[in-house]
Image (cartoon, rainbow, N blue to C red):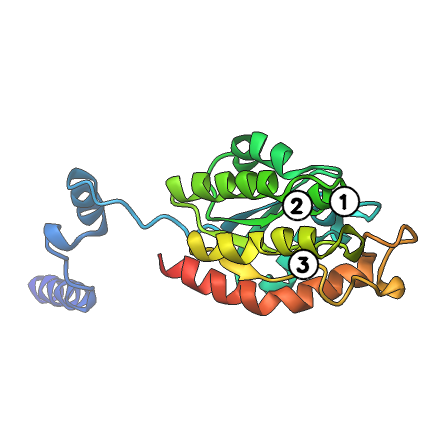
Amino acid sequence: MVAMNLIRERRARSAYGRQSPVRPTFLRPTFLLALALLLGIAAPAPARPLRLVALGDSLTAGYLLPADAAFPAQLQRALQARGFDVEIANAGVSGDTSSGALERLDWALGGECDGVLVEIGANDMLRGTDPALTRQNIEAILARLRSRNIPAFLAGMRAAPNLGPEYAAKFDAIYPDLAKKYDAAFYPFFLDGVAGRPERQLPDGMHPNREGVAIIVAGILPEVTAWLERVQKK
């Protein structure tokens, strides 16, 4: 009987010996979690997409196009295909002028915003608005964005030839001048590759069709990409 008890005791000790050693209290996961909470150490927040706002008129809104064919939607897909985690809100309003865009700027920005693409002024030009007023409004938009530390990307517009060389000289100079003054990323002509190309326009001869928007996106994409790379580093 004594021999049997000794055998059982040795087997029990052997079995315990094969178990993982008991960790000291300070190495246990529950203790480490409690310590992190006490020290105020929070887990890193998950990365969120870059949130951009496209502020503009019907050229941004996607006049007579389905939502997925509008400029912000096509640009978002093109950027995502290049590896950017980005969401672009469409803040385009058909018929809007630079005065209207300035008035609704704060509302259009909403909450958190990492950058704004500004495409405005075409309707000012079509109405023959004094370029000085258009300049004043766009400058106010860029100044307000800078005051809020929101990076800006400015898309330029050009005056129609029928408005004459004097008007065109004043209007066309607005965009490069202000982009330089406010250190905004700049694309000289939003409708490059579309203006004067009926096959890329709606029947009205002014607004881009789906293919036309794709041409705009392809043209502006390198500049927007370079801009976003700078935005991500801030």
Which image quadrant: the C terminus? bottom left
Residues under numbered marks 2 and 3 in contact, where contact means CB atoms less than 8 Å apart: no
Secondary element at tag 2: loop
Q: Quadrant of residue 147?
A: top left
Give the percent coordinates (x, y) of residue 122. Answer: 71, 47
Q: Mark 2 or mark 3: which comes first in sequence?
A: 2
User: In front: mark 2 or mark 3?
Assistant: 2
Q: Is residue 161 above or below residue 150?
A: below
Which image quadrant: the N terminus? bottom left
Nearest the eye: 200 or 47: 200
Q: Dot 3 corresponds to which residue?
A: 190
Q: Residues within 10 Å of mark 3 (few under 14, many from 20)?
A: many
Nearest the eye: 140 or 153: 140
Q: Amino acid at mark 2?
A: Gly
**Mark on residue 91?**
none
Secondary element at tag 3: loop
Q: Mark 2 or mark 1: which comes first in sequence?
A: 2
Q: Mark 1 or mark 3: which comes first in sequence?
A: 1
Q: Dot 1 corresponds to which residue?
A: 126
Q: Residue at x 8, y 65 (%)?
A: 6
